[in-house]
Amino acid sequence: MIKKVGVVSRCDKPGALDIAKDIIEHLQETLEVCVDPGTADELGMEGTPVGQMRQQGVHMIIAIGGDGTVLRAIQNMDDPLPVLGVNMGTLGFLVDVDSRDAMQTVDSILTDFKVDERFRLDVWINDVKLPPATNEVVIITAHPAKILAYKVWVDERELEELRADGLVIATPTGSTAYAMSAGGPIVDPRVDTTVVVPLAPFKLSSRPWAVPGQSRIKVELLLPDKEAVVVVDGQYSQTISAEDIIRIEKASKPARFILIKEDGFYDKVKSKLY
């Protein structure tokens, strides 16, 4: 039985704050609710940072907004709690619940729910660890219209040396995001693989790769006078230069999503992308 729930919302998205307020008031009738500081400030409540909600005894998080809201919440947790995404955006691949059905869906899972675990990627620049990626790590030119040169290694073996605008390294969860737009494959989340997709490569022979999910990936910049930016899930970014080495491998703690519909991935692809 769920006794404590966390609520986070994208306060500047039209309608999100109203939905958050309604859900919070409804839940407070029967259990405790922790609210992220941004939403709490808007509602005149005491807030709890998302990264501290597990320690506060929260069992699950309701994220109201779009995919970015869900990704931001997960990125702030070392050991992610199960997340239920309520869609206030447009596409929303990680937000399974329409805002009109939010209250009914929340009530239906308070006694029990299934969890869909999705692996994340740990990211290092040299020896400094960045926030983990649920969707993807993007290495892209810091200056528009300037091409970069990379060398990519997988398990200490050279995968490819290429010139391109950038590189996307995606989980199966992220295969339907930036990686797909760049020509990468759609990957069933049950497949244990990491996808490596060049962005606008100079050579036609530079194609997307699918490597084992347990692979240790290393990326080096080859041009000393070029800067790049590492972007994690569109939420965190850091500038790098040719002296820096990017390392990526599967994280020990997965992202967790509350499963609303069994085997819904293919239906979701058809309904949102076709």
Image: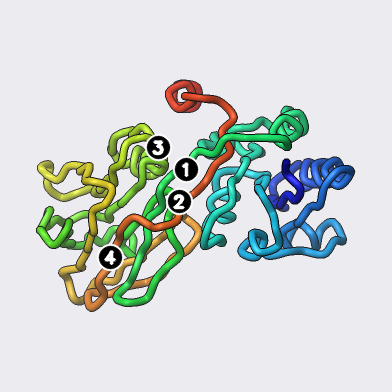
Q: Which residue is mark 3?
A: 176
Tell me the element at label 3: helix
The Cα atoms of the two marked residues, 3 and 4, are separated by 23 Å
Q: Are marks 1 and 2 in contact (CB under 8 Å)?
A: yes
Q: Position of residue 116 (x, y in %)?
A: 50, 38
Instruction: Identify the amino acid type marked 4.
Output: Arg
Task: Check disc 2 and report its element: helix, strand or loop.
Answer: loop
Picture quadrant of residue 205: top left
Label 2: how many Cα within 10 Å (few below 14, some 14–19, many 20+): many
List x then y, in percent, for residue 188. 36, 32
Q: Tell me if I can see residue 274 in this picture.
A: no
Rounded to the nearest whole Å, what is the CA distance between mark 1 and mark 2? 6 Å
Q: Disc 3 and disc 2: Cα gap in Å?
A: 18 Å
In the depicted structure, whether residue 193 falls above or below residue 144: above
- Label 4 near label 1: C-beta < 8 Å? no
Compute the Cα span from label 1 to label 3. 17 Å
Which residue is label 1 attached to? 117
Q: Which residue is painted at 85% across and 40% down in the image? A: 26
Q: Which residue is mark 4?
A: 247
Helix or strand or loop: what does disc 4 sit on? Answer: strand
Snapshot quadrant of residue 206? top left
